[in-house]
Image: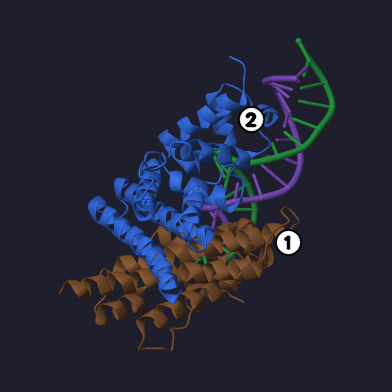
Chain colours: A brown, B blue, C purple, D green
Amino acid sequence: MALSRQAIVDAGLGILDAYGLGDLSMRRVADVLGVQAGALYYHVPNKQSLLAALSEEVLGTVPDPLDDTDPAAWLTGWAMSLRRSLLARRDAAELVASSLALGLVGPDPTEAGRALLEREGFHEPEATMATLLHFVLGHVVEEQTRAQMHALGVVGEFDAAASGARFEWGVRLIVAGAGRLLHDEAQRR
Amino acid sequence: MALSRQAIVDAGLGILDAYGLGDLSMRRVADVLGVQAGALYYHVPNKQSLLAALSEEVLGTVPDPLDDTDPAAWLTGWAMSLRRSLLARRDAAELVASSLALGLVGPDPTEAGRALLEREGFHEPEATMATLLHFVLGHVVEEQTRAQMHALGVVGEFDAAASGARFEWGVRLIVAGAGRLLHDEAQRR
DNA sequence: ACCTGAACACCGTTCAAGT
DNA sequence: ACCTGAACACCGTTCAAGT
């Protein structure tokens, strides 16, 4: 089988699931594909761009919420879907967070939400979505790190249900804040 | 001068400021101190714990807000102070974010805020502070990454003032949300 | 107790040379 | 065009041996 960008991405996803982000090296990807490490650079410019491609693969699985009428419900659903997609893949939150910070991910995951908030007359749709995104990523990074340490027996305490409850609280806080700032402004007119 | 834990931490801070987190290696720290890399392991168990110590150094510079009466003002002031301390040191947000996620930082930076919210009768003080902390860290990680890329001429656009405005919006959002959830509950009684 | 020297098992990336 | 082989310049960590 000939080497290709997609084959490299698939091998990367396999290593990510099986061994985690810390063990995802270019040499290991090459080994899986039965090829020398240098060969990868014919199809991918560097490791960062491979990681960005893996991030896009993860973000591609986030469905748009069905509810198109209530912005609060839409935002809540989006945050939950994003979390679910991140939790589905080992170390996905850390992977996506760093790729996004470097600005290497093509599609903007907050695009649909921003468009919705704009349509509905909310203020600062970009800053609002950025706030929600930072919270989701930060929360799930911590969640996946702690869960993994617990699995390795390093640290005892990890309550998945409590973690989920704290996630929902954070989303409620941000969504309520967006609604309140909208409401304050409406009163002023 | 004899090697010591503090000397190692200080050398680490120096490298961080001068070259960034990516160039902060145990070997480089050893070089600065005129010592072999292996010698460090007599004073520090591993690199992660050194990074945690550096994080504590950064977090130690965050002052508690003066305003003890208005919780909203306190939270806002705390978030601003934390951001300022992170921006003062190269790559500090990324450093602190990863150390905190690994649970290696001794003192909990959200402690004072949690105690305040508890005293004032807010709900879920822990989840509320975690939300604010995740936002601040996520925002400043992105801010420092983008500013550095801009300094290197990699990417053109970085507007520090706009970034600060978006930060303040995020803080307002979360603080307003905390107030709203408190208010809703008060009405129910 | 504290440090050196040297090793072990890795990295990302480049590049002449082959096909 | 695509890949190998080999190198370059690094990593974190361990550990016998010296003082």
Q: Is residue B11 left or right of residue A20?
A: left
Residue type at mark 1: give it: Ala
Structural distance between the alpha carbons of marks 1 and 2: 31 Å
In the rendered image, residues at marks 1 and 2 fall on the same chain: no
- Labelled disc at residue A151: 1
Kindly identify the residue that appears in the image at 50 percent across and 78 percent down.
A81
**Residue A49: in sight, yes or no?**
no
Placement of the C terminus of chain A among the 4 image quadrants: bottom left
Q: Position of residue B45 (x, y in %)?
A: 68, 36
Residue type at mark 2: give it: Ala
Q: Is residue A78 or residue B21 the one in the foreground? A: A78
Q: Position of residue B70 (x, y in %)?
A: 35, 52
**Residue A156: in sight, yes or no?**
yes
* Residue of label 2: B37
**Label 1: how many residues lie within 10 Å, few (<14), some (14-19) or many (20+)?**
few
Q: Position of residue A169 (x, y in %)?
A: 50, 69
Q: Is residue A97 above or below residue C6?
A: below
- From the image, state whether disc 1 or disc 2 is nearer to you: 1
Kindly identify the residue that appears in the image at 36 percent across and 43 percent down.
B84
Q: Is residue A180 above or below residue A153?
A: below
Q: Position of residue B27 (x, y in %)?
A: 59, 33
Q: Is residue B144 left or right of residue B97?
A: left
Q: CB of mark 1 within 8 Å of CB of mark 2?
A: no
